[in-house]
Image (spheres, grey):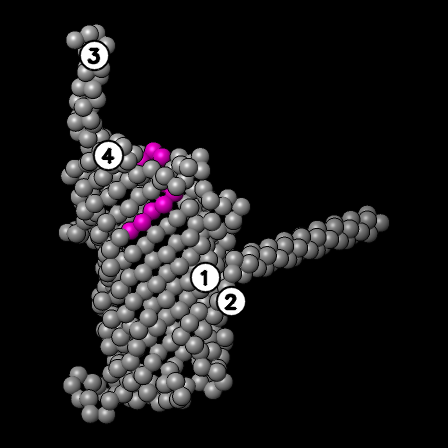
Amino acid sequence: MNRTTKILIAFVVLVIIARLLLPYFVLRYVNKTLADMDGYTGHVEDIDIQLIRGAYQIDELRVRKINGKIKEPFLFIPKTDLSIEWKSLFKGKLVSEVECYEPELNFAFADSEASSQTGVEVDWTAYLKKLLPININRFAIINGTINLTSLVTQPRADLALKQFQGEVRNIRNVEDKANQLPSPVTATGNVPGYGGTMTFSANMNLLKVVPDFDYNLRFSDLQLLKLNPLAKEYANLDFERGTVSVYSEMAMLNSKLNGYLKPLTKNMKIFKLNEHEGRSVGKFFTELIAQAGTAVFKNQKHDQVATRIPLNGTIDDVQTAIWPTLFGVLRNAYIEAFKGEFDNNITLQDALKSIKEDYKAKRAERKAERKEKRAERKAERKEKREARKREKEKSK
């Protein structure tokens, strides 16, 4: 056996040993990275390296809150696949894609810190970058579950999205850098607790600290009977039958937003004459009046009550207009029934209008402040002149 053959065999042996040991070192690094994440801790059961495909697979990733009272982990992903995006590589861009299979995300909302689990205090992107240093250009969720516990605390109302499918593409603007909203986002899911479905589509700019977006969101055929705990608590009534669908469009640019919510009920019934169990006299008349109001404001042909609620303002201060909302109820009842679809009249330019209007308002405010200061200075000069005049008169 010559020297070259020996070197070649030694090199192959070293590569094999490195390949066998690499998952161990990567697993150790990942678990060390996840050990302390600002009040959360994570652990990975196993990692599989696939050098030829340029990828590695994470098995059973769990993230839980430290010193929390929530039994369920904040995040559990049985399988995560992280790999190079070959399509972008052929365009000269080295970026990655992430696919999460059957993930489960558990949010909990409560007044106490120990009973709350939202993850807002953690910069998750920083830890994701440590796990995958290459920029992520595509992120996908396959058959996921999102649980929102105590979304309303009194009475307790939970919301769950099952069979959640979601995808975000072109995060790094590999395909279209000139587009204001280059990243398409899609998501679908079932709402089993309320008997409906959810669909979401958007275009976004995810490279900003506060992303810009233009989205369409729809919840279809939620059962009103499932909303009775909330209706009893806040309106002193309950529903006998019916469904509600909610349509929403929203555009946001530089934290300014414009959009609407369009709730649409079908076949709604509130009052039932022979209901005796647990109904007080006050609730009897409340439901009777509500049913009468429904009859007045219902579109008889389509058996629906609906309106359009305009939303505008900033991400921290969303405002609604009362009169357009009330007019929407009357319009649906007596002029033209709202359709169970998006209006498709909200664009990014609508959010830009809010910015322009806010700029005009601030400019008018500054103008008023300058005018007020000029008036104050004028009054001060006048008072000084009068004081000097009085002093002269005294000296005489």
Q: Report x, y in % for residue 234.
A: 29, 74
Please state which of the two labelled residues, at mark 2 or mark 3, is closer to the viewer: 3
Numbered disc 2: secondary structure: loop
Q: Quadrant of residue 248?
A: bottom left
The amino acid beneath tag 2 is Asn
Of 5 and 364, nearer the camera is 5
Disc on the earlier residue, 2 or 1: 1
* Whole-number angstrom distance, CA of label 3 to CA of label 1: 67 Å
Q: Report x, y in % for residue 167.
A: 34, 52
Which region is colored magenta? 132-141
Outermost residue toward the bottom?
273
Q: Report x, y in % for residue 158.
A: 23, 64
The residue wearing badge 3 is 5
Of 261 and 238, nearer the camera is 261
Q: Dot 3: within a 10 Å radius of its alpha carbon, few (fewer than 14), some, or many (20 or more) residues? A: few
* Whole-number angstrom distance, CA of label 1 to CA of label 4: 42 Å
The residue wearing badge 1 is 250
Numbered disc 4: secondary structure: strand
The amino acid beneath tag 3 is Thr
> Which quadrant would the N terminus be assigned to in this image?
top left
Disc on the earlier residue, 1 or 4: 4
| Residue 242 in the figure: left or right of residue 115 | right
The residue wearing badge 2 is 345
* Whole-number angstrom distance, CA of label 3 to CA of label 4: 27 Å
Residue at image point 32% right, 60% down: 188
Please name the predominant secondary structure of the magenta segment in the image: strand
Residue 50's tag is 4
| Residue 334 in the figure: left or right of residue 217 | right
Outermost residue toward the top?
3
Q: Report x, y in % for residue 270.
A: 28, 84
